[in-house]
Image (tube, rainbow, N blue to C red):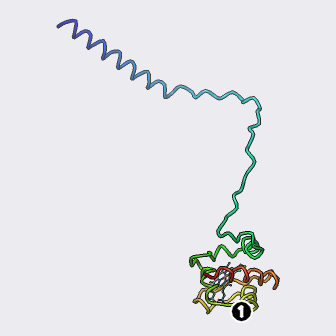
Amino acid sequence: MKTQLINTAMILGVLTMALSCSGKNETTPIPIPLPSTEQPVKQPAPHPEPIVTTNASNDPGFKLIEGADCLACHKIDSKLIGPSYQDVASKYTKADIKRLAQKIIEGGKGNWGDIPMTPHEGLSKDDAQQMVKYILSLKK
Ligand code: HEC
């Protein structure tokens, strides 16, 4: 009986010591890491994955659209700020190419709602028409 009590006391003592030790550890200064031996970490060459939205992503019209700000407001298959390009394609025909190209350059609203499309004055007529041709090719 008596030895058991002593043992318990000893265990308790060890425990308190362990606890106070870990308490002390908090004040131990964090060792400053040695200056690393200059070894340049080789970064793998970046491989930007092209965004493939349709298999027509090689289309020159799509390339122009991708390079401009259009995709901030338009998606191929769902409405964003502007109508989806598939919706645009089903509303118009080749006869509208010139008018739509002009609209992209000048901007405007009214055909799809009250949100206006921003003008793209820097865009050439040829480029704008190329974009429209691609958009119309999305007709389902
Ligand atoms: C700031 C957002 C925004 C950007 C950027 C934008 N559009 Fe639009 N776009 C719209 C909105 C909104 C409409 C709907 C206008 C309307 O109701 O007549 C629209 C309409 C269109 C239409 C249909 C026009 C019509 O009269 O039916 C085409 C085609 C189009 N956009 C192509 C483009 C192309 C190509 C670009 C890039 C050069 C572009 N958009 C950039 C918002 C945008």
What kind of residue is marked 1?
A: Asp
- Mark 1 beta carbon near ligand 1 (under 8 Å): no
Left or right, residue 1 beside residue 122: left
Residue 110, horizontal then vertical, whole percent: 61, 92
Quarter of the image where the N terminus is located: top left
Counting every numbered tag in the picture gives 1
Q: In the image, is residue 56 above or below residue 83? A: above
Residue 89 image-quadrant placement: bottom right
Residue at (63, 77) in percent of width and height: 74
Residue 2, horizontal then vertical, whole percent: 19, 6
Residue 115, horizontal then vertical, whole percent: 60, 86
Q: In the image, is residue 48 above or below residue 12? A: below
Q: Residues within 10 Å of mark 1 (few under 14, many from 20)?
A: some
Left or right, residue 12 beside residue 67: left
- Residue in the foreground of this view, choosing between 87 and 108: 87
Left or right, residue 18 beside residue 2: right
Q: In the image, is residue 6 above or below residue 121? A: above
Helix, strand or loop under label 1 = helix
Q: Residue furthest top?
A: 3
Residue at (30, 17) in percent of width and height: 12
Residue 4 image-quadrant placement: top left
Quarter of the image where the C terminus is located: bottom right
The image quadrant in which ligand 1 is located: bottom right
Q: Residue furthest left?
A: 1
- Residue in the foreground of this view, choosing between 89 and 11: 89
Residue at (69, 27) in percent of width and height: 34
Q: Which residue is mark 1?
A: 96
Residue at (53, 25) in percent of width and height: 28
